[in-house]
């Protein structure tokens, strides 16, 4: 179960980061285990030396919003069937350029 949560967290973090760059994401396909009804998401602290001060709150709240708007799971303060907690250990930005068809593309 722990390994599954680690994989799920990595997938969510990747989707979050892609969403910040204009990508899309969706949890609308549902939860694979019908016994999972609740989710608890603790505050992700910022331990990244170059991160903006607001990154912790933005990440935590975006993760909560994704689960509330795109799943049927109830958000609980503690001891959810799925539990997320952690910290932000790294942060980087990448330059983007607008192409002729008005989509963002990474440079370099």
Image (cartoon, rainbow, N blue to C red):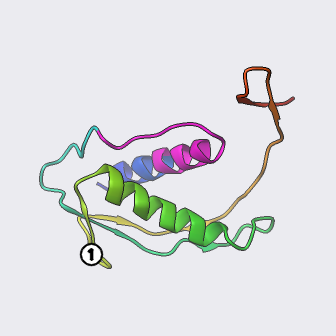
- For mark 1, give the secondary structure: loop
Q: Is residue 32 visible?
A: yes
Q: Residue 6 vs residue 23: left or right? A: left
Comparing 27 with 48, the one in front is 27
- Residue drawn at 40 percent across, 48 percent down: 8
Q: Position of residue 66 (x, y in %)?
A: 41, 55
Q: Residue at x 58, y 72 (%)?
A: 57
Residue 55 position, x and y percent, is 66, 66
Q: Residue furthest bottom?
A: 77
Residue farthest to the left? 35
Magenta stretch holds residue 23: yes
Queried whether the magenta region covers residue 54, the answer comes back as: no
Q: To which residue does mark 1 refer? A: 79
Placement of the C terminus among the 4 image quadrants: top right
Q: Please report the residue visible at 53 percent of the width from the left and 51 percent of the height from the top.
A: 13
- The vertical placement of 24 against 60, above or below, is above
In the picture, residue 105 is in which quadrant? top right
Q: Is residue 35 left or right of residue 81?
A: left
Residue 64, position in %: x, y?
41, 64
Report whether 35 appears left or right of 102: left
In the picture as drawn, the residue positioned furthest to the top comes out as: 100
Residue 2 can be seen in this image: no
Residue 27 percent across, percent down from the top left: 35, 44
Quarter of the figure with the N terminus:
bottom left
Region rendered in magenta: 11-28
Front-most of residues 33 and 93:
93
């Amino acid at each position: 179960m722990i390994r599954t949560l680690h994989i799920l967290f990595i997938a969510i973090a990747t989707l979050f980061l892609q969403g910040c760059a204009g990508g899309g994401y969706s949890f609308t396909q549902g939860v694979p285990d019908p016994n999972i009804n609740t989710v608890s998401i603790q505050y992700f602290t910022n331990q990244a030396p170059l991160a903006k001060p607001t990154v912790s709150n933005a990440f935590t709240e975006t993760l909560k919003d994704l689960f509330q708007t795109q799943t049927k799971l109830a958000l609980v303060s503690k001891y959810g069937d799925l539990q997320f907690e952690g910290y932000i250990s790294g942060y980087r930005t990448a330059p983007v350029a607008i192409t002729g068809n008005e989509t963002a593309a990474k440079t370099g």
